[in-house]
């Protein structure tokens, strides 16, 4: 009896739980989604601004993990937000992964085409539906390609403070989360043995160095972050944003006042964050054949804000398709265990205090929050913050309502409580 058959024999007679013979696998793939010709760029509600030049390319970046029967896809899209009506079209085109195990997050660059179909005051939208449908296909293609390339892998995971001038809070400079979470998949066989397949970076920041008013189409600081990680041997880079609401943004402040709003500053910040991510993960212990776990649930948030109701009902994308009524937005929240890390998704821009609280209550020392993932419903504040400080008027107006943050916290922590901690899935 050869070794493989012997192990299988022990499994079927119950000596070894079958899970132990399953191999963790990983792969990643990329598609460029820069529109040609260029399209107007959108920083949110209002008419998009025509773009005359581009700085860098817009991407879809997908990483897929597999162990046994569980497959998980994590996708980032260089856009302001990516509504689930678009995400679900991609999910329908993806083979071999349960739709609810496909997480699609937006990087929140403010220099990409409108993916919401924001209506103006006359109900007219400027979104290019043909472009968006092409992106839907690119997302599916990237995930399908990654699935086809799955190979045995190990993980290195670390969460630590990213140092240097990267982000700050525009409303209150020190109120932001400097922790950067990094998940690196490393090939355990084949010609790339011991080399990184992909590096996922999770960090809270507004990629709005360039912004939406300069007529420039750009991934903002995420572009230089991807290329730096790749040029330093980190494999395919994936960026998932965090709890970056109200108002955690890129620290592009100049010493004598004012801001640097150009591509050079995107390169400075993007490369610094990439270098910090690689430093943070460098000495992390290698997790051989790690376990993965994925669960999800649907959560509804009341829509109190008239402007949000207007967008949902007037967008040509039929943004309200998943909702049971015009007064509530329904979306998916995921909880993942990846090795010894735990991940929760946020369907919008949670304020940093929400991020701290949720991370503190997760069952891991390596908490990850994927902001603007599966949906992006604007800002998410607790009722204590809602319509409080004068500075919070704008973010209160562009949130679904007073209870969004509290409902999110309650539902997210319920998921943490009801599901196994990392490493305890089989018990
Ligand atoms: Zn924002």
Image (cartoon, rainbow, N blue to C red):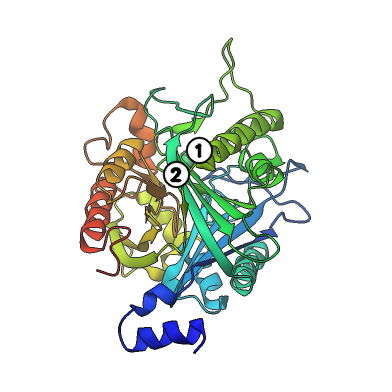
Q: Position of residue 139 (x, y in %)?
A: 60, 65
Residue placed under numbered mark 1 in the picture: 280
Residue at x 58% of width, y 42% of height: 110
Can residue 198 be seen at all in this image of the molecule?
Answer: yes
Kindly indicate whether the residue at mark 1 contacts the one at mark 2 (C-beta within 8 angstroms): yes
Between 306 and 337, the one lying in front of the other is 337
Q: Nearer the viewer, residue 133 or 62?
A: 62
Q: Position of residue 293 (x, y in %)?
A: 37, 66
Image quarter (top left, top right, bottom left or bottom right) of the C terminus: bottom left
Look at the image and tell me whether residue 82 can be seen. no
Q: Give the Cα separation between the discs numbered 2 and 1.
A: 6 Å
Residue furthest to the top in view is 256
Residue at x-position 63% and y-position 39%: 220
Where in the figure is residue 87, as x and y percent of width and height? 51, 66
- SS assignment at label 1: helix
The answer as to whether callout 1 falls within 8 Å of ligand 1 is no
Residue visible at 41% across and 22% down in the picture: 173
Left or right, residue 363 beside residue 391 = left
- The label on residue 35 is none
């Amino acid at each position: 009896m050869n070794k493989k058959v012997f192990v299988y024999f022990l499994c079927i007679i119950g000596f070894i739980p079958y899970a132990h013979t399953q191999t963790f696998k990983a792969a990643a793939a990329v598609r460029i989604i820069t529109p040609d010709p260029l399209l107007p760029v959108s920083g949110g509600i209002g008419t998009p601004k025509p773009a005359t030049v581009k700085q860098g390319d817009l991407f879809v970046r997908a990483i897929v993990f597999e162990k046994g029967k569980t497959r998980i896809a994590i996708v980032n899209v260089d856009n302001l937000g990516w509504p689930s009506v678009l995400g679900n079209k991609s999910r329908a085109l993806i083979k071999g992964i349960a739709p609810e195990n496909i997480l699609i997050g937006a990087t929140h660059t403010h220099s990409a085409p409108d993916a919401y179909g924001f209506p103006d005051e006359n109900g007219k939208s400027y979104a290019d539906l043909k472009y968006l449908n092409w992106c839907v296909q690119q997302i599916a293609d990237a995930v399908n390609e990654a699935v086809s390339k799955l190979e045995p892998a190990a993980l290195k995971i670390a969460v630590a403070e990213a140092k240097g001038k990267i982000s700050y809070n525009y409303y209150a400079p020190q109120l932001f989360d400097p922790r950067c979470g990094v998940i690196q998949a490393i090939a355990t066989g084949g010609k790339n043995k011991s080399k990184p397949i992909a590096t996922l970076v999770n960090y809270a920041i507004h990629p709005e160095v360039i912004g939406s008013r300069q007529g420039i189409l750009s991934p903002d600081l995420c572009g230089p972050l991807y290329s730096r990680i790749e040029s330093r041997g980190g494999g395919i880079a994936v960026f998932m944003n965090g709890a970056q609401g109200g108002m955690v943004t890129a620290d592009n402040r100049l010493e004598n006042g004012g801001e640097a709003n150009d591509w050079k500053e995107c390169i400075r910040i993007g490369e610094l964050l990439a270098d910090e991510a690689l430093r943070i993960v460098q000495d992390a212990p290698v997790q051989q054949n790690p376990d993965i776990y994925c669960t999800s649930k649907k959560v509804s948030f009341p829509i109190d804000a008239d402007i949000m109701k207007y967008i949902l009902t007037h967008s040509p994308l039929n943004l309200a398709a998943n909702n049971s009524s015009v007064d509530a937005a329904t979306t998916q929240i995921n909880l993942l265990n990846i090795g010894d890390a735990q991940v929760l998704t946020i369907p919008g821009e949670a304020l940093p205090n929400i991020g701290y609280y949720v991370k503190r209550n997760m069952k891991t020392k390596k908490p990850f929050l994927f902001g603007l993932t599966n949906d992006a419903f604007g800002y998410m504040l607790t009722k204590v913050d809602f319509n409080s400080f004068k500075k919070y008027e704008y973010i209160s107006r562009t949130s679904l309502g007073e209870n969004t943050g509290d409902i999110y916290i309650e539902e997210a922590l319920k998921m943490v409580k009801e599901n196994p901690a990392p490493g305890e899935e089989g018990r």
